[in-house]
Amino acid sequence: MTLINLPNQAILPLGEPPINPYRLGASLYMSATRADLWQVITRQQLPEVTSLVICLADAVSKHDVDDALANVQRLLTDWQTQVTAHLDNAVSQPTAFDRPLVFIRPRHATMLAQMATWQGIALIDGFILPKIDMLSLADWRLAWQQHADGNDTPPLVMPTLETAPIFNPHHNHELAQAFIEAFAERVLALRIGGNNLLACLRLRRPRQTTIYATPIGTLIDQLVGCFVPYGFYLTAPVFEYLDTPELFAQELQHDVALGLVGKTVIHPSQIAAVQRAFAVEASTVADANAILTQDTKAVFRQDNAMLEPTTHAAWARTVLLRAAVYDTID
């Protein structure tokens, strides 16, 4: 049962998200039990991290949940204390610092609601909403609303598509419309939970192939075709093998070709490969700029390729979003 019941309607896509979704890059998941979360946030450790997910869900065993919650509360309290001290001494101290994007992945909607009273919770960028579908959306939406009420900048959300209903295209079109209704413009991206989706099929990712050679590859194509026309961006699922870098690079190439905006990583050694894969060729940036130039021709040739601004403008804008974050290569 859901509180959101939308009739069939024309697709009304979202506007652009409040921050560039390509800033997610390689999203490093870290267990909420770790003692070095603050060091990563302040770039004392792993300065290459572009986005950090503090996980209270799958990365924390049931008997460690209370300790993990207490650890995150201490982290946020210390963070808030530092911000307050900087504000009190703003002449000599900055109020902000260079850091990765920071998200918390709660275990369930009840946990998300409980966090609304935590000191410092507004300092993070948003929340990962795991295992969300039409059956659970209302609970997640109500929990998120407790953070949004009275907040000039409600937290971002990244729902994770990783349950059995996600295999149903009709469900997904309803879910896309419901996301717009539930969270308005605060959805930064939709995450694809590859391993949980494989589990729905009683499968595990093979070591010798990319995820695109499994049934989830076909599903990812369908998810792109369903959610992107509504204005959503999607991120690529994790690659869990650390000893097959060539296969990882092959999968990243496919991720980029599908227009996915980042990739979950499980180890810092994977970050550099993600950064390389999302770098943009200078010729591609030149094509994008030419397409978006005012008063350009309706159809023209550049570098032996046909460019058609009416058709290619959305692609060109995406290229420039990506180039604003990643290196441009010759």
Image: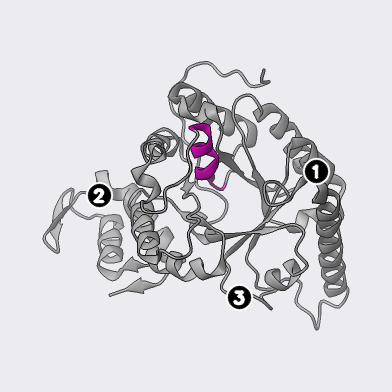
Asked if residue 9 shows in the view, the reply is yes
Disc 1 crowd rating (10 Å Cα; few below 14, some 14-19, many 20+) is few
**Which label's residue is closer to the chain start, 1 or 2?**
1
Q: CB atoms at circles 1 and 3 under 8 Å apart?
A: no
Mark 1, mark 3: which one is toward the viewer? 3
Q: Distance between the residues labelled 1 and 2?
A: 42 Å
State the image coordinates of residue 225 (x, y, percent, origin top left). Answer: 37, 35
Mark 2 lies on residue: 309
Q: Mark 2: which secondary structure?
A: helix
Q: Mark 1: which secondary structure?
A: loop
The N terminus - image quarter: top right
State the image coordinates of residue 219 (x, y, percent, origin top left). Answer: 40, 35
In-front residue for pair 213/228: 213
Q: Please name the amino acid that badge 2 sits on.
A: Pro
Residue at 30% from the left image edge and 56% from the top image edge = 292
Asked if residue 192 shows in the view, the reply is no
Instruction: Write the start and end of the magenta stretch as one range.
Output: 188-201
* For residue 274, above or below residue 260: below
Mark 1 lies on residue: 150
Mark 3 lies on residue: 47
Q: Distance between the residues labelled 2 and 3?
A: 39 Å
Q: Please name the amino acid that badge 3 sits on.
A: Pro
Residue 308 numbered mark, or none: none
Is-magenta flag for residue 86? Answer: no
Please state if 236 lies on the left or on the right of 140 as rendered.
left
